[in-house]
Amino acid sequence: MRVTIAAVGRLRSGPEKALIDDYMTRFDRTGRALGLGPANLVEVEDKKSGGMAAEAALLLRAIPAGSVLITLDERGEVMSSPDFATRLATYRDAARDVCFVIGGADGIDPSLRAQAQMSVSFGKMVWPHMLVRVMLTEQLYRAAAILAGTPYHRV
């Protein structure tokens, strides 16, 4: 099952990019034997400042056809890491690709949110969208580690 992360904004070099690259490499390495991955990050940028609707149009073009669409949204479901791993395994077993969508500073357009099969929240606090990328890639790696039974995740 391929994993795509479609995100608004370009991430420049720095500590966040280094963390994302590291966790994506770990996810690909750990997940490969489990049928998870590869993971791919697609960045979109609304250069005309058209707002959430314009960002949604760009994000829709970045979502691979037939993917399960999962939004990262403060209104989404809060779940434990083991529950997230189980959900990821369910999508993998259905032989589907998954696309996680991270909106810009104003969030995800309601029309795009309505198309999602699932919405995930990293808690009631609002996180900068660049940090959400780091948190998502870490959770993807953690999910692969849980499914592989490695000691990275201890319940």
Image (tube, rainbow, N blue to C red):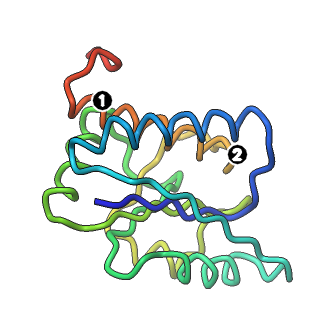
Local SS, label 2? loop
Q: Quadrant of residue 141?
A: top left
Q: Residue at x 63, y 44 (%)?
A: 126
Residue at the farthest right position: 48
Residue 36 % position (x, y): 29, 50
Position of 61 relative to 126 (above/below):
below
Q: Quadrant of the C terminus?
A: top left
Q: Quadrant of residue 115?
A: bottom left
How crowded pointer 1 is (Cα within 10 Å; few <14, some 14-19, many 20+) is rated as many
Q: Which residue is mark 1?
A: 145
Q: Does the image show residue 96?
A: yes
Residue at the farthest left position: 93
Residue 31 % position (x, y): 30, 41
Local SS, label 1? helix
Q: Which residue is mark 2?
A: 128
Q: Residue at x 31, y 66 (%)?
A: 97
Q: Amino acid at mark 2?
A: Pro
Q: Amino acid at mark 1?
A: Ala
Who is closer to the viewer here, 39 or 9? 39
Who is closer to the viewer here, 117 or 11? 11
Q: Measure the C-alpha gap from mark 2 to mark 1.
A: 26 Å
Who is closer to the viewer here, 150 or 7? 150
Residue 85 % position (x, y): 26, 40
Tell me the number on the disc at residue 21.
none
Q: Residue at x 61, y 85 (%)?
A: 57
